Image: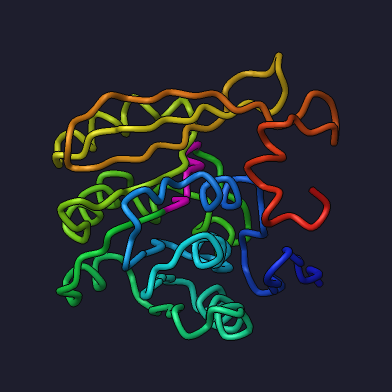
Amino acid sequence: MSKPFKFKQFTIHQDRCAMKIGTDGVLLGAWTPLENKPYSILDIGAGTGVIALILAQRSTAEIIDAIEIDDNAYEQCVENFEAAPWNDRLFCYHASLEEFVNEIEDKYDLIVSNPPFYSEDYKTDNNQRDMARFVDALPFNHLIKSASKLLSESGVFSVIIPFKEEEKFLTLAKNYGLFPHRILHVKGQPNSITKRSLIAFSFRESDLKKEELIIEISRHDYTEDYIALTKDFYLKM
């Protein structure tokens, strides 16, 4: 059994979710820019709901919607939303992104996604985990195209992807009129390779702000930048 993961202002139950709480989701929730003061937020592929919950804590958004296709993850996300202090603002849809795009008329001021991105050729015996991890469950092109349809004119689309996929992702986004305005490159330790790219897009071209984040100096010796970014959420920061 996976133990519940306690954050400072909410708790995540994750025993029925293929993808457990990891650094990626917390980073995306904590880093995503909120300068446009979103009224409505959408989390695509919510999993446990952690990103939506972090954004509920950080923002004054009235509507925070999430979509999750996997049955177990959907039920778990609903449970985590209902137990949260902001449960009146949180709602999870049990749907595929395709169904959602076709049915929803509304536009969102902020769209976030920690998409599945293990596009390597191997698969495990756990189908649920594979679906949460493999890019064929939610191809980047489908994600970007859908986000461009659901995003309000002044909205922000924020993702975390493998660094090696960044160039491809930026090219695809440009095809749908989405331009990066902030990029954060994440390394585990000072001498390790860049593993993740966090990118915030909008429909307006603007000066691109690029930054780097190193998570730890050595095992569990976290950098000041990482602590500053996550201290409002992690209990032990």
Q: Is residue 63 above or below residue 20?
A: below
User: x and y percent of residue 170 in the render?
Assistant: 29, 30
Q: Residue at x 39, y 61 (%)?
A: 44
Q: Residue at x 57, y 85 (%)?
A: 82
In depth, the one of 118 and 30 nearer the eye is 30
Q: In the shown orientation, is residue 130 left or right of residue 44?
A: right
Q: Is residue 8 above or below residue 217?
A: below
Q: Say which quarter of the image contains residue 200.
A: top left
What segment carries the magenta color? 113-120
User: x and y percent of residue 130 in the render?
Assistant: 54, 55
Q: In the shown orientation, is residue 179 left or right of residue 80?
A: left
Q: Is residue 105 above or below residue 206?
A: below
Colour setup of the view? rainbow
Q: Say which quarter of the image contains residue 218.
A: top right
Q: Any magenta on residue 86?
A: no
User: x and y percent of residue 18 in the render?
Assistant: 62, 63
Q: How many marks?
A: 0
In depth, the one of 64 and 61 nearer the eye is 61
Q: Residue at x 52, y 47 (%)?
A: 28
Q: Is residue 140 above or below residue 102?
A: above
Query: Mainly helix, strand or loop, the magenta region?
Result: loop
Q: Residue at x 67, y 59 (%)?
A: 20
